[in-house]
Image (cartoon, helix red, strand yellow):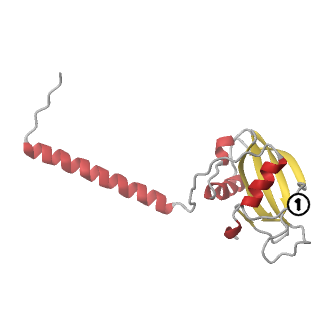
Amino acid sequence: MFVVSMSSSNLKKLFGVVCALTLVSLVVVFFVNSQSNVTIKKVSLHTAETADDRLKFISDHGWIVDEEPVEVRQIAIPQEFDDVYSNYNEIQLSQGYDLTKYAGRSAKRWTYIIRNYPDVSENEDYVRINLIVCDGKIIGGDVCSIKLDGFMHGFEKDSV
């Protein structure tokens, strides 16, 4: 059996130290979170094993696409991210995904033409949605324009 005896003044000092450490920890956590440019959401990975799964995911985000993908390509997620991949992963983090968890793995990128992007005619085909799929689950992706002065953002239609 272990017994510790403390005077009330020592107990008050210990309590003060614990309170101070707790306060410092909270300030550090707040400061670190406020310095981040990325808001991280948690998402559950959506199944994307079938065309219907992928089309439902896209539709759930408010997009209308051609049923057939314009491209399906095997991709390799690099073991170490360069600046381009790090910046791309910032988009992923902002929508609750994290490609660093899949570093060094292969995945498939499914690309569809979006037909209802704001201020773009449904006959134009330069706005795309990319779904990155690994082990039958969507692990990331983006909405982008393939024009020279294009754009890229997350899946959400209201992030336009």
Q: Is residue 71 left or right of residue 143?
A: right
- Residue 120 lies, in percent from the top left, at 84, 75
- Residue 48 lies, in percent from the top left, at 77, 46
Residue under the point 84% across and 69% down: 148
Q: Looking at this rendering, what residue extends furthest in the bottom direction?
A: 119
Mark 1, secondary structure of its residue: loop
Q: Quadrant of the C terminus?
A: bottom right
Q: Nearer the viewer, residue 54 or 97?
A: 54
Q: Quadrant of the N terminus?
A: top left
The count of marks equals 1
Q: Nearer the viewer, residue 59 or 23?
A: 59
Q: Residue 41 lies in what quarter of the image?
A: bottom right
Tell me the crowding category of disc 1: few under 14, some 14 to 19, or many 20 or more residues within 10 angstroms, Cα based.
few
Q: Looking at this rendering, what residue extends furthest in the top direction?
A: 1
Pointer 1 residue: 66
Residue under the point 78% across and 49% down: 53
Residue under the point 76% across and 41% down: 136
83 over 120 or under it: above or below: above
Residue under the point 14% across and 48% down: 12
Q: Residue 39 lies in what quarter of the image?
A: bottom right
28 over 148 or under it: above or below: above
Q: Nearer the viewer, residue 39 or 67?
A: 67
- Residue 89 lies, in percent from the top left, at 67, 54
- Residue 77 lies, in percent from the top left, at 74, 44
Amino acid at dot 1: Asp
